[in-house]
Image (tube, rainbow, N blue to C red):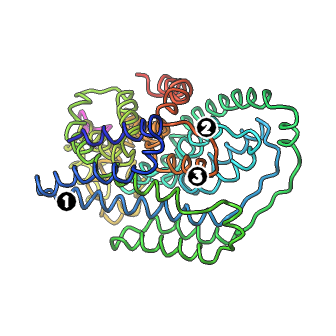
Amino acid sequence: MILPFGVLLAAIALGPLFCPAWWTKHYPKVAFGLAAITLTYYLAGLHAYTPVVHVAHEYVSFIALIGSLYVVSGGIHIRVKGEATPLANVLFLLIGAVLANVLGTTGASMLLIRPWIRMNKYRVTGHHIVFFIFIVSNLGGCLTPIGDPPLFLGYLRGIPFWWVAEHCWPMWATGVGIMLAMFYVVDKINFARAPRQVREKETAHETWHFDGLYNLFFLAILLATVFIDRPVFVREALMLATAAGSYFTTKKSVHEANHFNFHPIQEVAILFVGIFATMLPALGWLEGNAGSLLGADPASGIFYWGCGALSSVLDNAPTYLCFLSATFSSFVDHDVVVQVQHLIQTGGADLAGVVGSHADEIKNTFLALQKYHGDQVLAKGVSNEEIEICFLLGNVAFNKYILAISVGAVFFGANTYIGNGPNFMVKAIADHQNVRTPGFVEFIFKYTLPFMLPMLLVVWWIFFHD
């Protein structure tokens, strides 16, 4: 039953390459047809309604966020001072990488892709779009739970908000720094090859211009709604209402300046119906086998490469959760959890007297709980799941596994157009503005393997090679 997912990936990769006219006309039938096969199997064959309802909820949340950000960002017109030299481009991408941690990779991508295309309009080509996806749509969001969906799910599971920034910044700086250096070299070659008149146009001074900035208010509302979890679908309803408010209050001239229409989000919505439905069996298999695949005493590099490789072709958020669960089952000692729960009930009075082979693990876990969940410790209301998280975070020997899956899920999501939600969205917007973007296969062989893979190897060697 993983076959429909494989067929859909092959169709997305090869359809635009070998039969673009047919694919443009019939891709909805392909996506809906393959989704129907998988859903029929689950609903009529297995009578497994729960996973279908769960993935439907995830899809609605995904498309509500992506669509709302697309609409709101489409109401903000930014004209950048037109000095699109390689150095100016690097600075723009660095700002985008930092901004991704505040607005999320999706928000930063939707806000910045149009001005990015405009400032490079005289020589914009495939590498401008791909490196934007690498840096702004993925790597940049590795410092906060707002940055990327896997990290947000980790936050909901109990990983403290600032723990990610505190521990992931060396990987973030290394990965973003390498990709910016690579981009500078590629863009400098591209700039040097441009005719003199093109370079003169590129470096002609223009004034900064912003229009529709009141939509930043709607953007702030969208970011706030991300943290609403109950009741079900209230978050999504608020997102759609915010998008509607933005759309109907934005001046027509702003939409025209941004070449705004709904075709890119329509394409993404249709294709991801197929992706979310057909990946159900793949995620189910991964959830059941992740622990055994990792082995009894896995190296952190296995988590990095395993979670990362699967995040390249599956939704990186549920992939992250599967590996987080595998981390719990592989390393958390339940005797330690019981003893820490006892310490909490006694207010930590027996901490100094803890002895035995697990004494250090018990003390470190309790200290981590005091650091990250101090109020709950005082109120004696800490859950076992929070203790398990602090067991992993408080003991240095184990928190590297959380780091490995966090960095793997975020970084590897850049490897394909479907690895992370904003990737395909950026491509759709660029295509609509007549920018030549690489196809699915070309993306991997021309950009992922020669640029992303060396960076991923360096990050692994420095931080997860054990």
**Disc 2 versus disc 3: distance between alpha carbons?**
15 Å
- Of callouts 1 and 2, which one flags the residue occurring earlier in the amino acid sequence? 1
Where residue 451 sits, quadrant-wise, is top right
Which residue type does callout 1 highlight? Thr
Which residue type does callout 3 highlight? Ile
Residue 131 has which mark? Answer: 2
SS class of the residue under badge 1?
A: helix
- Of callouts 2 and 3, which one flags the residue occurring earlier in the amino acid sequence? 2
Q: Residue at horizontal 67%, vertical 60%?
A: 258
Pointer 1: what residue? 50
Toward the viewer: 423 or 461?
A: 423
Quadrant housing the N terminus: top left
Residue 370 part of the magenta segment? no
Is label 1 or label 3 in front? 3
Is the residue marked by circle 2 packed among few (<14), some (14-19), or many (20+) residues within 10 Å?
A: many
Q: Position of residue 306 (x, y in %)?
A: 35, 32
Q: Position of residue 114 (x, y in %)?
A: 66, 53
Is the residue marked by circle 1 packed among few (<14), some (14-19), or many (20+) residues within 10 Å?
A: few
Toward the viewer: 163 or 195?
A: 195
Toward the viewer: 183 or 142?
A: 183
**Disc 1 versus disc 3: distance between alpha carbons?**
35 Å
Q: Is there any visible trace of residue 289 in the rendered image?
A: yes
Residue 429 has which mark? Answer: 3
Residue range of the region highlighted in magenta in the rendering: 353-361
